[in-house]
Image: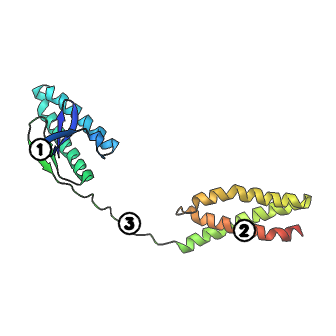
Amino acid sequence: MLLRIEGERAVLVGRDGTAERAVDPRRLPLGAELTEALHEWARVATAVGRGEQEAGAAAGAVVTRRGLQLAGRVAATMGVPVGYQDPLTGEQHTVEPRPEPARPVRSAEPTPWLTGLTVSAVSLVLVLITVVTLAATLAETHALLAVASNVVVTAGLLPSLWLVRRQPVWRWVAYGVAAAIAMAWLALPFILV
C-alpha cells in the first residue's frame, strides 16, 4: 500500500492482481478524523508544490514530516506497512506499523478508611438529625406529613447519591447520607407512636 497525492486528494495505491488501484481513504476503515487529516495534508502539499521557491524548503520539510506521520497512523490503523511517496521530491519511504505505546498503569491509591469513615459518620449524623427532626415536627401536625417528608427527602437525595457513589471523595458522604436515610425510615414508626 502506498500513500500519495493525486490532484489535491490523498489516495492509497495498492496492487489488485497485476494492476495498480488507487483507493480514496474514505473507503477504508481509517476513521473520519484520519481521513480528513490525509485530505488536508494533500491540499497543503499541493499548495506548497505550486508555491514560490523561498518558502518551499521550510514548508516542504513540514509537508514531508506530516506525510510520514500520517503514513505511520495509516500503517498502525491498517496493521500493514505503508509506503509514502513524498509529493514534492518524489522519494519513497516505507513506514512500518508500530504498536501504540502502552500507557503506564497507575497504581491504586490506598483507601483512606479513617478519614472516609469520619466523613461518613459526620454526614450520617447531620442528615439523620435533620430528617428525624423534620419528621417529628410534621408528625405533631399530622402523621401523614411525617411520612410524606421522608418520601420527599428520600426521593430528592437518592439520585444525587447514585451519581456520586463512585467519586473518590463524595462516595464517603454518599455512604453516610444513605445510611442516615435508612435509619430515618427505621425511626419513623417510633416518631409516629
| Mark 1 residue type | Thr
- Give me the residue at 18% from left, 35% from top: 5
Q: Viewed as shown, does residue 2 lie left or right of 127?
A: left
Q: How crowded is mark 1: few (under 14 residues within 10 Å), some or many (20 or more)?
A: few
Quadrant location of the C terminus in the rendered image:
bottom right
Q: Viewed as shown, does residue 7 lie left or right of 183?
A: left
Give me the disc on residue 106. 3
> Cα distance, mark 3 to mark 2?
36 Å
Q: Which colour style is shown? A: rainbow
Which of labels 1 and 2 is toward the front? 1
Q: Locate residue 30, reporting x and y percent.
A: 30, 46
Secondary structure under tag 2 reads: helix
- Disc 1, disc 3: CB below 8 Å? no
- Give me the residue at 28% from left, 44% from top: 28
Secondary structure under tag 1 reads: loop
Q: Viewed as shown, does residue 18 lie left or right of 179?
A: left
Give me the disc on residue 110. none
> Cα distance, mark 1 to mark 3?
51 Å
Residue at label 1? Answer: 18
**Between disc 1 and disc 3, whose residue precedes?**
1
Q: Quadrant of residue 184?
A: bottom right
Q: Is residue 26 visible?
A: yes
Closer to us: 1 or 144: 1
Q: Is residue 70 above or below residue 122?
A: above
Secondary structure under tag 3 reads: loop
Closer to us: 28 or 106: 28
- Give me the residue at 17% from left, 30% from top: 48
| Mark 2 residue type | Ala
Closer to us: 180 or 77: 77
Residue at label 2? Answer: 182
